């Protein structure tokens, strides 16, 4: 039955080919396949898409068509798709920004936490869609970034991949280039930062490199926009000709012999319809689990009905499926009838051979096979560099290294760090305080307009207090506090200083079961806990993510800082507020120590590149800032507004009094606070800074000293600071560590706050306050 | 103390050294091929010697135990290379090394290390071009961990221990056997900053202590 089905699909293809010819979209060799996609996106109904998906993959065997052809998303519009791939810190984002300007969208890869940036540009009347792949060093460790990149390349088949390479770190960058070449995709190299490399005494011969690699190599200086036009020209001509590199850079003889043998086997078995045979062979020798699982996965039965459509968002098709290799079964089905006379060995035999060959390599070299292949790859990179790059001047002691002597000094390093952090916190909260008042006053004018509306008084209250005040509260937190804070954090990151902080703090973080990198989410927590908790996912293992996320919820965010400064800071003085801050830091530290002690497993350890110092460029800095604030806008903001609405409804219906009374014994008896504070605390869960506003609203005064004595104010401040993550943070936690852990963390923090608040209350009473 | 027992202690430390995090007793038993009851005895002795600490999650090496484990692992690696160079199969070399590692003296170890060309020069598949800038015969001391280097010193990577994922990540960043590494500085509390293939990396102390090197007699500039 399946062959028949297949026949139908082939017909579909020829029909489509005919259409393509008639409408005359393109005269290019591989343009037909691209046309399917466009037509399919525009017109095909979901039911047909399965057929198309199969037909497509059938037609997509790299050997037959000229590899990697995908149309754009717009129906009938000629658009080409291009990907930027390269190491982190090579100026890839800068290049992306220079190319696309403001015309870009930032999101996440479906189902992943990796940022996806995409943009379009026009060059020589050609619309080009560019996807900026995450910065990676290799395609081997199966990190999210690497999987996303690999899947993108094989599933979405960009017409051209631009490999952005740092000319001053050529050897390490070529390590990735060699792997991209193994994928046998149309590749163009942007040899970036050639000026910086030259200043370091490295002269790179681009022509030579191009000849050896068999791909165009264009020298660029992305920061100054140099070489971009040439790069795009090379890219367009590559997209037109689709000249796939045919230069094979052989490994050492022992490795190469085994790669070829395995590749032949794979070819014979007809398994190379999606990835090139040599690539599969290398990956299998390396013991790549993803590829092995993909080969082993049995094609699902009842194909047509169950396999999700290939159309729609191409990205979803590419990444969202658990295996990540959605179209395998489809394509294989398309393949089988094609080669009926191949007396092929099966997948198990190929895998067995791979293991045997890998074992032989380990025996010869006395190292792990992955180490053997990495070594050989670096060996190749090393030879290429020696050939193509002349070091004309001896290495100089660069300014950055001298800066590091201070920045990483065991004493001065910390002094600089503390000074910088305190300085920036102080100025941000000074600025925030001022601008938030100005902004709040300005937005408050809307109240007059709301109350002029011809609706019942009750609706006005609901509209104003419930909706508008919620929105205003969000805005007056984001713009004055969170935005400048994240901007500063991005600047610190892009200058390279954040990596230095990670290095300095690594040992301290180890005691908490984390390592230096976790400083990034923890520092983010000072702005808003929501992006901080989400940011905890940069950590390498589950245990680290859990600890980092938990600690991030305890970092006093800007809303909590506003409350602390607005009560304790104003009425008891800044030193008391600072003392509370320090106590919170101590609490975070102790919590970290405890979680490290009692959580099973062990941390991963720091492995991080320390990039050279550089001036941050605006584009990437703003982009990063937005990527972080986005979490606040999309997750926290709606919850804040919804919380305000709920609160207003409870207030208008009078229910709030009863809720408050329920907790009186705890609030009045144990914490020694007025009943009103209980209500405020409960609804502070919705928004922490709301606590302050509510306190003012209920007591009818902003002179909090009139309703809270100093003891109560301290207790109130302490409880507010630690008693629970706000609703938005709880939502973020749930996404990051799951529901059960979120409940445990939240309850534990409430318990801790009540315990410590009560203890503080009774100690202060004992001391006679 | 009984020599056989001591050998078992060394064996246990070596095994624990290669593991991440606290190891449950059953796992240790499997790892060194003993019955559970026997492991209990060994464990008692290990604790008495202050080599391990035991808590609810399992057995963890103390710093003393870590040193011992590291020493044995180093000897094992060296012997295995030696035996491979003699032409033994990998499996045989491994098993023999497991026996010999306990009786190899430190001085013989140093001597063996001096005489034995590193894996990088032995078989690289391309007539030993790797590390052609360095003469393997002109230097050589007992293998030492990256953390043992002083600021500014250069070493050549011999072997990297640790989990597969970590090793792969380090390989990807250019830390492959036979590569010269410069220790730039040690940070407060243990992380190291190093340069490899013109790249500057920061590694946590735990990871750095599992990278073994041969020290070079000169610094980066070749002095």
Image (cartoon, grey):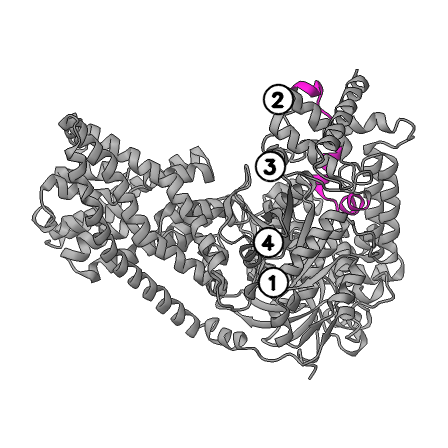
Q: Which chain carries label 4?
A: A
Q: Name the residue carrying label 3.
A: A73
- Residue A296's place in the image compared with B33, above or below, is above
Give the CA separation, mark 4 to mark 2.
37 Å
Query: Which quarter of the figure is the N terminus of chain B placed in?
Result: bottom right
Q: Earlier in the sequence, mark 3 or mark 4?
A: 3
Q: Which residue is drawn at 35% across and 69% down?
A: A419
Q: Mark 1 lies on which chain?
A: B
* Quarter of image, res A747: top left
Label 2: state its secondary structure: loop
Residue A450 placement (x, y as % from top left): 18, 35
Residues marked 3 and 1, same chain = no
Q: Which of marks 4 and 2 is nearer the N terminus?
A: 2
The span picked out in magenta is: A278-305
Residue B38 placement (x, y as % from top left): 66, 44
Label 4: state its secondary structure: loop
Q: Name the residue carrying label 2.
A: A45
Between label 4 and label 1, give the one nearer the viewer: 4
Q: Which chain carries label 3?
A: A
Q: Name the residue carrying label 4.
A: A135
Any mark on residue B208, and which? 1
- Is residue A470 or residue B23 the one in the foreground? A470
Q: Do callouts 2 and 1 mark residues in contact (Cβ within 8 Å)?
A: no
Q: Which residue is drawn at 81% across and 47% down?
A: A358
């Amino acid at each position: 039955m399946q062959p028949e089905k297949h026949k139908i699909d082939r017909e579909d293809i020829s029909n489509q080919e005919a259409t393509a010819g008639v409408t005359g979209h393109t005269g290019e060799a591989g343009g037909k396949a691209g046309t399917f996609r466009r037509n399919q996106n525009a017109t095909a109904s979901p039911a047909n898409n399965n057929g198309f998906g199969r037909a497509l993959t059938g037609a997509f065997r790299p050997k037959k068509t000229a590899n990697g052809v995908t149309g754009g998303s717009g129906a009938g519009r000629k658009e080409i798709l291009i990907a930027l791939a390269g190491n982190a810190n090579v100026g890839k984002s800068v290049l992306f920004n220079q190319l696309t300007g403001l015309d870009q969208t930032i999101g996440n890869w479906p189902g992943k936490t990796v940022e996806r940036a995409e943009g379009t540009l026009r060059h020589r009347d050609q619309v080009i869609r560019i996807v900026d792949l995450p910065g990676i060093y290799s395609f081997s460790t199966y990190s999210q970034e690497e999987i996303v990149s690999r899947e993108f390349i094989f599933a979405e088949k960009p017409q051209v991949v631009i490999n952005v390479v740092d000319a001053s770190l050529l050897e390490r960058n070529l390590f990735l280039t060699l792997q991209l070449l193994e994928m046998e995709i149309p590749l163009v190299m942007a040899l970036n930062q050639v000026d910086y490399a030259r200043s370091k005494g490295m002269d790179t011969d681009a022509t030579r490199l191009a000849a050896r690699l068999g791909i165009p190599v264009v020298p660029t200086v992305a920061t100054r926009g140099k070489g971009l036009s040439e790069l795009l020209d090379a890219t367009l001509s590559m997209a037109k000709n689709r000249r796939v590199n045919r230069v094979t850079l052989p490994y050492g003889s022992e490795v190469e012999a085994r790669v070829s043998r395995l590749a032949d086997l794979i070819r014979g078995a007809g398994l190379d319809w999606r990835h090139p045979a040599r690539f599969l062979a290398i990956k299998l020798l390396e013991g790549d689990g993803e590829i092995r699982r993909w080969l082993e996965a049995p094609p699902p039965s009842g194909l047509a009905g169950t396999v999700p459509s290939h159309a729609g968002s191409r990205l979803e098709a590419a990444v969202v499926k658990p295996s990540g290799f959605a179209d395998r079964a489809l394509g294989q089905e398309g393949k089988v009838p094609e080669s009926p006379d191949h007396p092929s060995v099966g997948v198990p035999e190929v895998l067995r051979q791979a293991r045997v060959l890998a074992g032989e390599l380990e025996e010869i070299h006395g190292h792990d096979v992955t180490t053997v292949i990495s070594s050989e790859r670096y060996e190749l990179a090393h030879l290429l560099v020696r050939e193509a790059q002349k070091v004309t001047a001896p290495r100089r002691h660069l300014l950055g290294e001298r800066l590091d002597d201070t920045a990483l000094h065991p004493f001065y390093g910390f002094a600089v760090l503390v000074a910088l952090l305190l300085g920036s916190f102080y100025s941000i909260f000074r600025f925030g305080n001022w601008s938030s008042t100005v902004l709040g006053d300005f937005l408050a004018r809307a109240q007059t307009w709301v109350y002029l509306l011809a609706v019942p008084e009750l609706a006005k209250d609901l509209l104003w207090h419930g909706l508008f005040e919620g929105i205003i509260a969000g805005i007056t937190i984001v713009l004055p506090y969170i935005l400048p804070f994240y901007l500063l954090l991005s600047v610190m990151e892009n200058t390279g200083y954040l990596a230095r902080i990670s290095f300095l703090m690594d040992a301290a973080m180890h005691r908490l079961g984390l390592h230096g990198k976790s400083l990034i989410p923890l520092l983010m927590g000072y702005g808003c806990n929501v992006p901080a908790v989400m940011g905890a996912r940069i950590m390498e293992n589950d245990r680290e993510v859990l600890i980092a996320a938990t600690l991030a919820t305890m970092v006093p965010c800007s809303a909590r800082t506003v409350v602390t400064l607005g009560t304790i800071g104003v009425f008891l003085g800044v030193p008391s507020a600072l003392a509370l801050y320090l106590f919170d830091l101590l609490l975070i530290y102790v919590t970290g120590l405890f979680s490290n002690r009692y959580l099973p497993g062990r941390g991963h350890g720091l492995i991080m590149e320390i990039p050279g110092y550089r001036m941050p460029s605006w584009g990437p800095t703003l982009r990063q800032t937005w990527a972080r604030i986005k979490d606040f806008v999309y997750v926290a903001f709606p919850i804040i507004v919804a919380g305000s609405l709920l609160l207003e409804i409870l207030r208008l219906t009078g229910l709030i009094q009863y809720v408050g009374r329920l907790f009186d014994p705890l609030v009045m008896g144990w914490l020694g606070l007025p009943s009103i504070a209980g209500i405020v605390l409960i609804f502070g869960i919705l928004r922490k800074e709301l606590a302050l506003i509510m306190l003012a609203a209920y007591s009818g005064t902003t002179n909090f000293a009139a309703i809270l004595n100093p003891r109560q104010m301290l207790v109130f401040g302490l409880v507010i600071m630690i008693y629970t993550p706000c609703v938005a943070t709880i939502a973020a936690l749930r996404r990051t560590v799951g529901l059960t852990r979120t409940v445990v963390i939240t309850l534990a923090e409430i318990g801790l706050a009540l315990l410590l608040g009560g203890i503080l209350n009774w100690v202060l009473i004992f001391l006679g306050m | 103390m009984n020599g056989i027992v001591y050998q078992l202690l060394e064996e246990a430390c070596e095994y624990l050294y290669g593991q991440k995090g606290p190891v449950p007793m059953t796992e240790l038993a499997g790892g060194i091929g003993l019955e559970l009851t026997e492991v209990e005895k060994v464990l008692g002795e290990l604790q008495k010697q202050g080599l391990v600490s035991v808590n609810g999650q399992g057995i963890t090496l103390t710093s003393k135990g870590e040193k011992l484990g590291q020493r044995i692992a180093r000897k094992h690696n060296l012997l295995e290379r030696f035996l491979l160079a003699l032409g033994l199969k990998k499996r045989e070399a491994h098993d023999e090394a497991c026996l010999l590692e306990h009786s190899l003296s430190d001085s013989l170890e140093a001597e063996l290390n001096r005489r034995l060309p590193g894996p990088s020069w032995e078989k690289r598949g391309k007539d030993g071009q790797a590390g052609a800038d360095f003469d393997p015969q002109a230097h050589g001391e007992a293998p030492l961990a990256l953390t043992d280097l002083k600021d500014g010193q250069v070493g050549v990577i011999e072997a990297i221990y640790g989990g597969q994922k970590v090793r792969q990540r380090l390989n990807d960043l250019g830390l492959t056997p036979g590569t010269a590494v410069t220790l730039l500085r040690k940070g407060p509390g243990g992380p190291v900053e190093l340069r490899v293939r013109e790249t500057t990396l920061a590694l946590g102390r735990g990871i750095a202590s599992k990278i073994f090197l041969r020290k070079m007699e000169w610094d980066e500039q070749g002095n």
